[in-house]
């Protein structure tokens, strides 16, 4: 999401404010007495002139609503598993990306050789340095653009594989659960939740790693 955030909680970097887009963060109420409670609220709630209208959430409320959302998933399990298989298959097929990567690698090798020859000729013969610099800079710029395209494709391939793996973990957890979940499980949360979005009217949208969103 392009945001920096640090916490050791399983809810960290998972809860988004539907009003401003910032992460939710933890805050402890009654930290020194028996009424101690950890709540989560938008980290930017009091930073701007216009306060975010999203409500805070207790951890118990997050757990309870997650269980309800996941149990709704189970009722659509077979349909969702079929959809996930299609998505995972599409993401795992990097044939086109691999072909483009090979083409770019070959082109990069050619340009790198041209740069080497350009430098070698300049070192062995007297040349107009303005012309040499222009030729060298043109080749170097071309090389950098090709390398950037190659890096972008490699990033896309890695992202596709990571998403396919996440969908696989989600499918495993969904296929293992035939009966409704009775209580919150840290392992299940980590395996299946991509993010949840909290809205000003207290609605919570749970987005699962399979790409499915359900209001909890």
Image: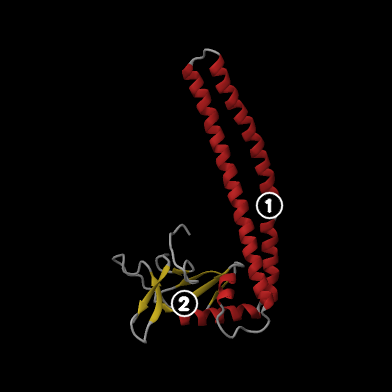
Up-down relation of residue 97 to residue 9 (above or below): above
Residue 23: image x %, image y %?
Answer: 43, 66
> How dense is the environment of label 2, judged by Cα within 10 Å: few (below 14), some, or many (20 and up)?
some
> Which residue does the image show at 62% across and 28% down from the upper left?
113
Count the marks.
2
Q: Nearer the viewer, residue 20 or 156?
A: 156
Q: Nearer the viewer, mark 2 or mark 1?
A: 1
Residue 83: image x %, image y %?
Answer: 68, 68
> Which residue does the image show at 69% across and 48% down from the upper left?
96
Q: Nearer the viewer, residue 162 or 10?
A: 10
Q: Marks 2/1: CA distance?
A: 37 Å
Query: Where is residue 29, by image quadrant?
Result: bottom left
> How dense is the environment of label 1, judged by Cα within 10 Å: few (below 14), some, or many (20 and up)?
some
Q: Earlier in the sequence, mark 2 or mark 1?
A: 1
Q: Which mark is residue 94?
A: 1
Q: Which residue is mark 2?
A: 203
> Which residue does the image show at 45% across and 79% down from the upper left?
59
């Amino acid at each position: 999401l392009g945001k920096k955030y640090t916490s050791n909680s399983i809810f960290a970097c998972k809860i988004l404010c539907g009003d401003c887009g910032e992460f939710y963060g933890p805050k402890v109420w009654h930290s020194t007495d028996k009424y101690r409670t950890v709540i989560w609220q938008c980290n930017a709630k009091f930073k701007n002139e216009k306060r975010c209208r999203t409500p805070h959430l207790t951890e118990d409320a997050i757990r309870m609503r997650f269980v309800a959302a996941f149990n709704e998933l189970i009722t659509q399990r077979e349909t969702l598993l079929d959809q996930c298989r299609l998505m995972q298959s599409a993401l795992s097929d990097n044939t086109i990306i691999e072909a483009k990567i090979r083409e770019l690698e070959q082109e990069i090798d050619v340009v790198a050789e041209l740069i080497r020859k350009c430098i070698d000729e300049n070192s062995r013969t007297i040349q107009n340095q303005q012309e040499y610099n222009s030729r060298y800079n043109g080749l170097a710029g071309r090389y950098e653009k090709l390398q950037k395209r190659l890096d972008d494709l490699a990033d896309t391939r890695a992202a596709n594989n990571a998403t396919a793996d996440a969908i696989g973990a989600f499918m495993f957890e969904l296929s293992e659960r035939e009966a409704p979940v009775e209580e919150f499980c840290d392992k299940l949360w980590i395996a299946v939740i991509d993010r949840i979005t909290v809205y000003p009217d207290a609605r919570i949208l749970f987005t699962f790693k399979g790409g499915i969103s359900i209001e909890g």
